[in-house]
Amino acid sequence: MAKVGSFVTDPRAGAYCKVTLDSGEKIIVNHDKGGFKGGMLTIEVQKFMGFSSERVFFCNLDSDEGRTALTQLTRNVRPDSVEATPLAAFVEYFKDCRSVSEIKAKCDALMASRGR
């Protein structure tokens, strides 16, 4: 199972969490607004000793698709809890993934399942 770091919140920059996968790959999940607001959620793979990164997933939480995905991920959590935030919901969704390719596949499946 992935090693999930602390959730860090910066009122001006949003919130992020660093995750180390079983494969040794390190990713950063970033929610540009933090908290319960919309905005963009991105997942990036850290490259070259953390000095650069490659975006592997993004979700506009203000779009119909993004709202549907977030609703699906938070349907069984208390609405005012940390688990209901976009950052925590997405980290919880993929924390059992062993590699970046598994995260991509799982997130693609989530976004494809909208409207079902």
Image (cartoon, rainbow, N blue to C red):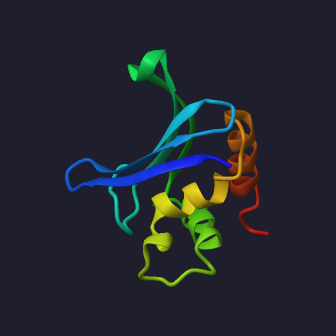
Choose between 74 and 21: the one closer to the eye.
21
Residue 101, percent across and down? 73, 34
Question: Left or right of 40: which side holds 2?
Answer: right
Of all residues, the one furthest to the left in this rendering is 12
Residue 25, percent across and down? 60, 30
Choose between 21 and 103: the one closer to the eye.
21
Of all residues, the one furthest to the right in this rendering is 116
Residue 113 in which image quadrant: bottom right
Residue 34, percent across and down? 34, 59
Q: Residue at x 49, y 73 (%)?
A: 84
Q: Residue at x 49, y 62 (%)?
A: 88
Residue 14, percent across and down? 30, 52
Image quadrant where one finds the C terminus: bottom right
Question: Left or right of 97: which side holds 91?
Answer: left
Residue 77 in which image quadrant: bottom right
Vertical placement of residue 61 versus 102, above or below: below
- State how many labels appear: 0
Q: Residue at x 35, y 65 (%)?
A: 35
Question: Left or right of 5: which side holds 22?
Answer: right
Question: Left or right of 2: which side holds 78?
Answer: left
Q: Residue at x 75, y 43 (%)?
A: 105
Choose between 70 and 15: the one closer to the eye.
15
